[in-house]
Amino acid sequence: MNENAIKIDGLGFSYGKLKVINDLSLEIPRGTSFGLLGPNGSGKTTLIKLLIGLLKPSCGNIQCLGQRPSFSNAIMRGYMPQLPSLYTELTVRHNIDFFARIYGLKYKKQREERVDEVIKLVDLWDKRKTQVMHLSGGMKQRVSLGCAIVHNPPLIFLDEPTVGLDPDVRVKFWEYFRTLTNAGVTIIVSSHTTDDAAHCDKLVFLRQGQIIAVGTPDELRSATGNANTSLEDAFLYFIRKTGEVQNAQ
Ligand SMILES: Nc1ncnc2c1ncn2[C@@H]1O[C@H](COP(=O)(O)OP(=O)(O)OP(=O)(O)O)[C@@H](O)[C@H]1O
Ligand SMILES: [Mg+2]
């Protein structure tokens, strides 16, 4: 598919004097799962917050489905933060229903059906009447994912969604993400694990707020000269390569 869901041009962002995103340009095609990979502090969360309009760029441009990011725009609200931000005194069902309401599922019957569907999808049916404060960390992650997707957003931004999840739940999530991208939804997902990365259609390797490589998992592996290498080794290869280029300048 040629159409871009997201277009980023010369993006820069600093927290005070700390430059976190540095002259970053990127195009993300519609209907793809796009992985942001990079070590702690490389700028993954900051980039996601810029994409959804929670932070304003210091320079450069971002277009999400042809619009400037703004968190008041419902299309930017398919956001699952790195740390779950839930109403812990409320039940699982009430949390997901709350986000369904504020994100525009007006009709009660339709909303209730969708909320039930999402609770089953995140595998928390047995816990639907449990207060979130009594859930485990991985279960809270699952509620948080449910809140991000309940209103069927066209763009979904997931900041390390699979941390702490059981392998079978992780597989189920990725199956669901595939059905969404097949339906034209674009998913931006940050991750540390190369297990997640392998599921993505396309990846960007980030380091110190800069892109050091972009491509499909196969392209990135092949670029190392060994198509069978792991994505972890491919990442290290690009880090070394960037270092060599910088040293030669
Ligand atoms: N609110 C903030 N104020 C000041 N500096 C910040 C703030 N949030 C993040 N930073 C800094 O910005 C840089 C990028 O942080 P960011 O959270 O985007 O990285 P990340 O790639 O998401 O890391 P992680 O893998 O640990 O989640 C880090 O150096 C971090 O210390
Ligand atoms: Mg982060």
Image: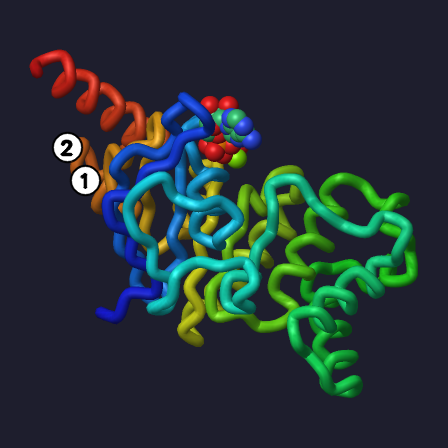
**Residue at left offset 32%, top offset 38%:** 12
Residue 231 in view (yes/no): no
x, y percentage for residue 232?
A: 36, 30
**Callout 1 secondary element:** helix
Mark 2 vs 1: CB contact within 8 A:
yes
x, y percentage for residue 44?
A: 44, 38
In-front residue for pair 167/141: 141
Q: Which residue is mark 2?
A: 225
Position of the C terminus, as image quadrant, is top left
43 up-or-down from 54: above or below? above
**Residue at left offset 59%, top offset 44%:** 162
State the colouring used for the structure image: rainbow
**Residue at left offset 56%, top offset 63%:** 72
Residue reaching furthest to the left = 249
In-front residue for pair 199/1: 1
In-front residue for pair 111/52: 52
In-front residue for pair 124/47: 47
Residue 100 in view (yes/no): yes
**Residue at left offset 47%, top offset 64%:** 155
Q: Say which amino acid is labelled 2.
A: Gly
Q: Say which amino acid is labelled 1.
A: Ser
Q: Quadrant of residue 106?
A: bottom right
Residue 222 circle label: 1
136 up-or-down from 168: above or below? above
